[in-house]
Image (tube, rainbow, N blue to C red):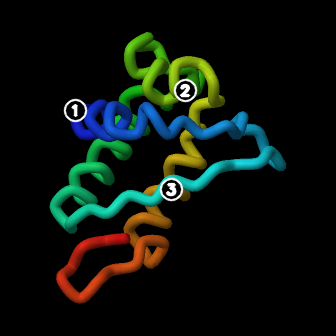
Amino acid sequence: MAALDALAYQLKDRRPTGTGQPGARRDRVIVQMDRRELATILGALRFHQAENLQGSGQIPDQSILDVASDGGTLKPLSHAEVDRLCQKLNCGGARTTRKGASR
């Protein structure tokens, strides 16, 4: 989860104002990364999905919940929403530059 912690740290001054609720206004964050970084984020998301979002869907680890909810300001993504995010990142939701960096 270190990759997500580092990403959260880098983005902490650009906190979204959306609530994470369906129909709510959501701010977009644009991050450039190389394929290795993208693979790490996808792996971390899948690990989070398998370890924290099985069963009740409640995130048991408070430190992970804090990152996933941006300190309680957002509703964390559900198992299905993490799945859609991974698909978006992995299957065309992220565009690739000539040098292979996702944008």
**Quadrant assignment for the C terminus:** bottom left
The residue where tag 3 is placed is 85
Query: 7 and 90: which one is in front?
Result: 7
Place of residue 73 in the rendered image (x, y in percent of width and height, measured from the top left) = 63, 24
Above-or-below relation of 74 to 43? above
Name the residue: 21% across, 56% down: 37
Q: Is residue 22 left or right of residue 30?
A: right
Q: Which mark is residue 69?
A: 2
Q: Residue at x 31, y 71 (%)?
A: 102
44 shown above or below 91: above
Which type of secondary structure does the marked residue at label 3 adopt? Answer: helix
Q: Earlier in the sequence, mark 2 or mark 3?
A: 2
Q: Which label's residue is closer to the chain start, 2 or 1?
A: 1
Disc 1: which residue: 2
Say what amino acid the circle numbered 1 marks. Ala
Quadrant location, the N terminus: top left
Crowding at mark 1 (Cα within 10 Å: few <14, some 14-19, many 20+): few
Left-right relation of 43 to 24: left
